[in-house]
Amino acid sequence: MIKCKNCGKRPHELPEYIVIAKNEGITPDEYVAREEGTYNRETQLFYCTPCYVQVGMPLGTA
């Protein structure tokens, strides 16, 4: 299950991913898996934008 490492929200709960995915014709989960730079394929975790900023904008994946 893809979710934010910090807050636990799933892509379909985050407006920015909902809008972008809709425009691309894919699901929010697919968008995160394909395009989100912090997404870790092994753990299925990523940082949503607010959490990414909150944890100090680390380099690499979640």
Image (tube, grey):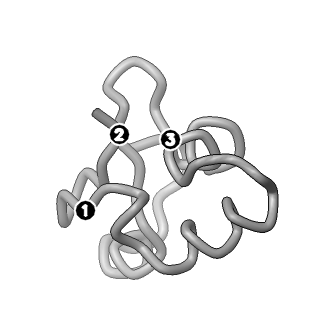
For discs 1 and 3, the disc positioned in front in the rendered view? 1
Reading the image, the residue beneath label 1 is 9
Q: Is residue 37 visible?
A: no
Residue 39's tag is: 3
For the point 50% across and 44% down, the residue is: 29
Q: Are marks 2 and 3 in contact (CB under 8 Å)?
A: yes
For the point 58% across and 37% down, the residue is: 33
Q: In the figure, residue 42 lies in which quadrant?
A: top left
| Count of numbered tags | 3
Q: Secondary structure at mark 3?
A: loop
Q: Nearer the viewer, residue 58 or 12?
A: 12
Q: Indicate the amino acid at tag 3.
A: Tyr
Q: Are marks 2 and 1 in contact (CB under 8 Å)?
A: no
Q: Indicate the amino acid at tag 1.
A: Lys
Q: Secondary structure at mark 1?
A: loop
Label 2 vs label 3: CA separation? Answer: 9 Å
Q: Earlier in the sequence, mark 1 or mark 3?
A: 1
Q: Is residue 13 left or right of residue 18?
A: left
